[in-house]
């Protein structure tokens, strides 16, 4: 269609410059905080002889700063051929510790000085939140580069990244060879100081310190000037923001809009501003007529928060703006000829079609601008924008704070011809999602008591309206019913009362609470089952339509709910719970069909945000496992699903399925078709089994979807008379889902197993299935024809993940359900994985009591690797059954002296321990006294007063992680631990002494070694497997070995060598009691 001509109203306005200005008058309450990074030339440009002088310069500056966790944080890195981080912003919390660490920094030495790589390291890692960076909290960030020669690599990318992140950069150059480079890199040329030679470097501290203090006190700031727009005419401007971009980006965009507002003449007769956010659905934040002054509007913008989400539907969002915001009652002055502008900002390609929605806005004469970053599709944005010249592709949206000029100018000056079509003016707010065809009967059951009350009713209504807006409400698609309850239930309308979305929303808008001080939730659910889910009141359960009960409550029930919830589930109704306030979150998880269908917010005002979280499961999850073929189309083929996951198929390859094998091939193809297959995304493996397993291809065999589909199409039946599914499940765990064959479990990539069988297994499946679940694998089981339903259920993660059909022709129904699970966003996958772990622990014999102590090398040599150590501990704890009466965990760090972070009785939940580990700081220290540390854990940690249950017979386990040889003797303390039957496992990194580890370890096979801290995840599965086998029985059967000391005399020795790492078994022993 023809684009409309743009008519400028005034000269380009916006940014005049983007620079750095010192503030002449400091704020009354100076912000005495900053994140400061020293990046020091460690190449031969400096040399070993001169390096102490450069190091002293950093120390002199640090001595003049108020260093602390909540004031100035300091990090140091050297650069030569590669950047080397000496310590992070969150490594040390006081000045003395920082100065001690700087004193110990040694010259690295290299002919190359790759400053570019180092700048990128600073921008990507050193200033990030995991490293202690506080940019998201508004804390200024500064970098001091000390250089003695030109860079050997291109530094432009790192320089751009730092400037985009508003990092204030200073430079100290020794000699004159690097002056031009540092003047380019520095935020301002005046921020580069020069020393003629290394003897003069120390004196530079007095010159540099005022600059750094200027940053911390707020007297030096990055000043990105928006100039006042003097002659901006009337206009309505809507900012449409992709809410999935994360807190950092959203906060930056919020600041950009606030600064823009400060330049505009805001008012009902001048410039009006509206804001909406979107992911899969859109959410109104600010209407055009909501605020009539800059002050009120900026206050509202200050309350703007990121919203969770994984995919974006830009088409839905554009329609939302057109139908819900460009209306006279919402402040739009389109009918008065006032220019209407929409600025779309997104970092993703849309999952829905944008063409029709964009054209609808263009026909109204709306001037749409589109800005994209990261994976946004430029061609798609050109389709959306009013004109291709109104499309902006940015590396990072934060650059708008630095260079907002062009976009601000266009928002201030663009004008367009308003054409024939006016805005859609529906009576109610309606948004239709056209990407899914959903058939469901949904009953909302609302707590009408004083637990919600009139003050919170609007939030409940907004939540219901948000859900209904995203559904296709009509008699042959989605039907809606509504009831409320307190002591007694009350029906508002049945499933067959209203046939249109408008009617449903109008009735919801009229909802008034019935009142009451007590809740009988169980009685209300029973009433809903017998009155709402009936054919006479509109239920289509007999036609195979999924029945859904959505409970919304704000308080505890005084009657029994769980038994009624089970009754509702048995009747085929899927229960979701949405709660806030005084509702019992834990109890409601037992009321929901499965725990991850229970949603809780602490405040009622947050309920509308639950809409985005609940929609995918609300329209995809099914509540029964007894499938019959119906003529109802549940969903269209889903869009390509992105995200890392490993998906393995274990299929029946026996002679029994020969005639039906094409159905199995087709089933696999339909499950994997929506997945984004690739070695760095979704990996696929297929294995057949009968008497024994026969792999067709592994997770790392094929690199793309075309190759996988070709391989599946070429599958031929393996053949065999009987099924040994238990053996095959063990094969999947030990072989297919192992790192050597492509599994990425060690990198926390979700692991899925889909088992399909048409007969009963000759061997037991329970133990093998339990072992899979213990390892975090989520199994689904599909039974066809003669499959044993009990075995299918035993294999699956939970009964909801077990499917049984009578014929292979019905597999298409199962495929749709599997897609909904395998395609879940990562946050929801994490919930399922957590459930899998809990489920496995509750049923598997590995769930035994253990007291586990981590003893960590905290010497200076482990400083850069300490974040990896923290991650390693968290990953192990994540696999344990942490409770007061199950597994207990303690962490001790040592160098010259040991120090306990927490004891065995300090924390009683897994989340508490993981949180405590995340807050650990590196101890530091030059020497390593491992022997003293072993004595410390024996006398201070493995004691009853510290939570040890050794006297109760609970296995005692010590995991030692060290990076170098101990300065003191370890043999005596190691023997003393073994005498107490404390099982020690040794993990060596880098220069750790293998002989010393074997002396300390309970057995030589209980040692593990990696060359780098980054390789720790590779040994995590082996270590966790050993921990799970160390029950009381195995401990009693494994005798300690100390090389050179005959501890085995007089003891039974019976060791299952399969539990040891074969690389560390130097010989085999067989001893009888003497």
Image (tube, helix red, strand yellow):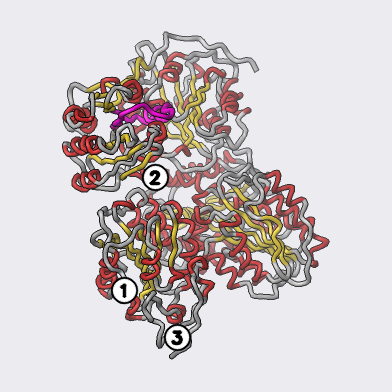
Label of residue 1052 in the image: 3
Residue at the spot 37% in from the left edge and 49% down from the top edge: 603
Asked if the residue under mark 3 is in contact with the one under mark 1, i.e. CB atoms within 8 Å, the reply is: no
Left or right: 129, with 610 as reference point: left
Tell which tag, 1 or 2, sits nearer the viewer: 1
Range shown magenta: 144-170
State whether residue 817 appears in this view.
no
Q: How many marks?
A: 3
Question: Which residue is at 66% across, 48% downward?
Answer: 702
Q: Which residue is mark 2?
A: 605
Quadrant where the N terminus lies?
top right
Residue 490: image location, x then y, percent: 50, 56
Q: Secondary structure at mark 2?
A: helix
Q: 579 above or below 267? A: below
The residue that label 1 is drawn on is 948
Given residues 473 and 637, the one toward you in this image is 637
Q: Does label 3 or label 2 sit earlier along the sequence? A: 2
Please state which of residues 22 and 815 is positioned toward the viewer in this rendering: 22
Task: Indicate whether residue 929 is drawn in magenta.
Answer: no
Does the magenta run of residues contain 163?
Answer: yes
Find residue 838 and report its horizontal and vertical position in percent.
48, 65
Residue 179 left/right relative to 628: left
């Amino acid at each position: 269609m023809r684009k409309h001509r743009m008519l400028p109203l005034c000269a380009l306005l916006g940014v005049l410059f983007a620079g750095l200005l010192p503030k002449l008058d400091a704020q009354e309450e100076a912000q005495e905080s900053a994140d400061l990074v020293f990046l020091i030339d460690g190449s031969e440009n400096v040399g070993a002889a001169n390096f102490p002088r450069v190091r002293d310069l950093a120390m002199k500056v640090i001595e003049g700063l108020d260093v602390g966790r909540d004031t100035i944080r300091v990090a140091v890195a050297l650069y030569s051929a590669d950047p080397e981080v000496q310590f992070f912003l969150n490594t040390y919390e006081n000045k003395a510790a920082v100065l001690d660490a700087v004193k110990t920094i040694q010259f690295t030495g290299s002919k190359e000085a790759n400053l570019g790589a180092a700048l990128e390291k600073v921008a990507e890692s050193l200033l990030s939140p995991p490293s202690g960076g506080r940019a998201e909290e508004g804390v200024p960030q500064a970098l001091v580069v000390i250089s003695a020669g030109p860079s050997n690599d291109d530094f432009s990318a790192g320089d751009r990244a730092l400037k985009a992140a508003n990092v204030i950069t200073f430079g100290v150059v020794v000699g004159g060879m690097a002056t031009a480079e540092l003047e380019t890199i520095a935020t301002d040329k005046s921020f580069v100081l020069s020393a003629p030679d290394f003897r003069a470097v120390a004196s530079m501290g007095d010159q540099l310190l005022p600059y750094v203090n200027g940053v911390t006190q707020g007297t030096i700031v990055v000043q990105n000037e928006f100039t006042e727009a003097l002659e901006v005419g009337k206009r309505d401007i809507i900012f449409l923001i992709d809410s999935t971009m994360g807190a950092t980006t959203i906060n930056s965009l919020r600041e950009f809009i606030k600064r823009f507002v400060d330049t505009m003449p805001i008012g009902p007769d001048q410039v009006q501003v509206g804001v909406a956010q979107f992911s899969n659905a859109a959410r109104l934040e600010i209407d055009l007529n909501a605020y009539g002054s800059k002050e009120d509007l900026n206050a509202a913008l200050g309350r703007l928060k990121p919203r969770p989400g994984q995919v974006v539907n830009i088409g839905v969002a554009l329609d939302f703006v057109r139908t819900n915001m460009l209306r006279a009652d919402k402040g739009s002055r389109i009918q008065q000829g006032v220019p209407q502008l929409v600025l779309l900002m997104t970092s993703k390609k849309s999952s829905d079609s944008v063409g029709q929605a964009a054209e609808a806005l263009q026909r109204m004469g709306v001037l749409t601008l589109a800005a994209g970053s990261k994976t946004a599709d430029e061609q798609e944005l050109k389709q959306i924008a009013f004109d291709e010249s109104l499309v902006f592709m940015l590396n990072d949206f934060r650059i708008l704070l630095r260079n907002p000029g062009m976009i601000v100018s266009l928002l201030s000056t663009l004008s367009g011809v308003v054409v024939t079509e006016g805005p859609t003016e529906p009576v109610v707010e309606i948004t239709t999602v056209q990407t899914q065809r959903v058939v469901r009967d949904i009953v909302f059951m609302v707590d009408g008591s004083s637990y919600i009350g009139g003050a919170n009713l609007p939030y409940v209504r907004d939540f219901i309206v948000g859900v209904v807006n995203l559904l296709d409400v009509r008699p042959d698609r989605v039907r809606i019913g509504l009831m409320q309850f307190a002591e007694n239930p009350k029906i508002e309308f049945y499933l067959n009362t209203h046939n249109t979305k408008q009617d449903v929303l109008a009735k919801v808008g009229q909802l008034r609470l019935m009142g009451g001080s007590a809740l009988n939730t169980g009685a209300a659910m029973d009433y809903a089952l017998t009155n709402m889910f009936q054919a006479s009141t509109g239920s289509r359960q007999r036609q195979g339509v999924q029945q859904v009960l959505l409970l919304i409550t704000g308080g505890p029930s005084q009657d029994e709910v769980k038994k009624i919830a089970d009754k509702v589930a048995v009747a085929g109704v899927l229960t979701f719970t949405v709660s806030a306030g005084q509702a019992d979150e834990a109890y409601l998880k037992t009321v929901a069909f499965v725990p991850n269908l229970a949603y809780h917010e602490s405040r009622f005002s947050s309920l509308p945000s639950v809409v985005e979280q609940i929609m995918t499961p609300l329209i995809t999850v099914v509540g029964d496992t007894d499938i019959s073929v119906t003529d109802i189309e549940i969903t269209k083929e889903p869009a390509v699903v992105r995200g890392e996951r490993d998906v393995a198929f274990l299929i029946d390859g026996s002679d029994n399925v020969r005639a039906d094998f094409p159905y199995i091939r087709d089933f696999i193809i339909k499950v994997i078709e929506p997945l984004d297959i690739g070695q760095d995304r979704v990996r696929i493996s297929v294995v057949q089994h009968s008497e024994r397993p026969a792999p067709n291809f592994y997770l790392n065999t094929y690199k793309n979807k075309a190759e996988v589909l070709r391989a599946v199409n070429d599958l031929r039946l393996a053949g065999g008379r009987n099924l040994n599914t238990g053996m095959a499940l063990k094969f999947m765990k030990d072989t297919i889902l192992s790192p050597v064959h492509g599994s990425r479990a060690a990198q926390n990539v979700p692991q899925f197993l889909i088992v399909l069988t048409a007969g009963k297994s000759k061997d037991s499946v329970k133990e093998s299935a339990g072992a899979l679940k213990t390892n975090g694998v989520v199994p689904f089981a599909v039974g066809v024809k003669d499959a044993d339903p009990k075995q299918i259920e035993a294999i699956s993660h939970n009964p909801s993940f077990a499917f049984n059909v009578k014929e292979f022709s019905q597999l298409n129904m199962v495929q749709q359900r599997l897609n909904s699970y395998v395609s879940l966003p990562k946050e929801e996958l994490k919930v399922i994985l957590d459930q899998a772990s809990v489920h496995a622990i509750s049923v598997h014999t590995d769930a035994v009591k253990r007291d586990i102590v981590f003893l960590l090398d905290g010497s200076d040599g482990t400083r850069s690797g300490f974040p990896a150590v923290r991650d390693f501990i968290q990953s192990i704890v994540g696999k344990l059954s942490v409770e007061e009466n199950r597994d207990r965990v303690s962490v001790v760090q040592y160098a010259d002296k040991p120090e306990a972070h927490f004891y065995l009785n300090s924390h009683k939940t897994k989340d508490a321990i993981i949180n405590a580990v995340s807050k650990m700081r590196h101890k530091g220290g030059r020497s390593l006294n491992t022997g003293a540390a072993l004595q410390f854990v024996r006398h201070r940690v493995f004691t009853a007063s510290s939570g040890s249950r050794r006297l109760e017979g609970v296995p005692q386990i010590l995991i030692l992680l060290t990076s170098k040889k101990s300065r003191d003797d370890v043999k005596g303390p190691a023997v003393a631990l073994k005498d107490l039957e404390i099982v020690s496992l040794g993990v060596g990194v880098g220069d750790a002494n293998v002989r010393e580890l074997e002396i300390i370890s309970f057995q030589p096979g209980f040692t593990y070694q990696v060359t780098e801290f980054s390789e720790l995840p590779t040994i995590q599965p082996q270590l966790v497997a050993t921990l799970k086998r160390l029950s009381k029985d195995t401990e009693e059967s494994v005798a300690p070995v100390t090389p050179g000391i005959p501890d085995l005399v007089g003891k039974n020795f019976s060791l299952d060598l399969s539990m040891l790492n074969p690389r560390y078994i130097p010989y085999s022993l067989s001893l009888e009691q003497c």
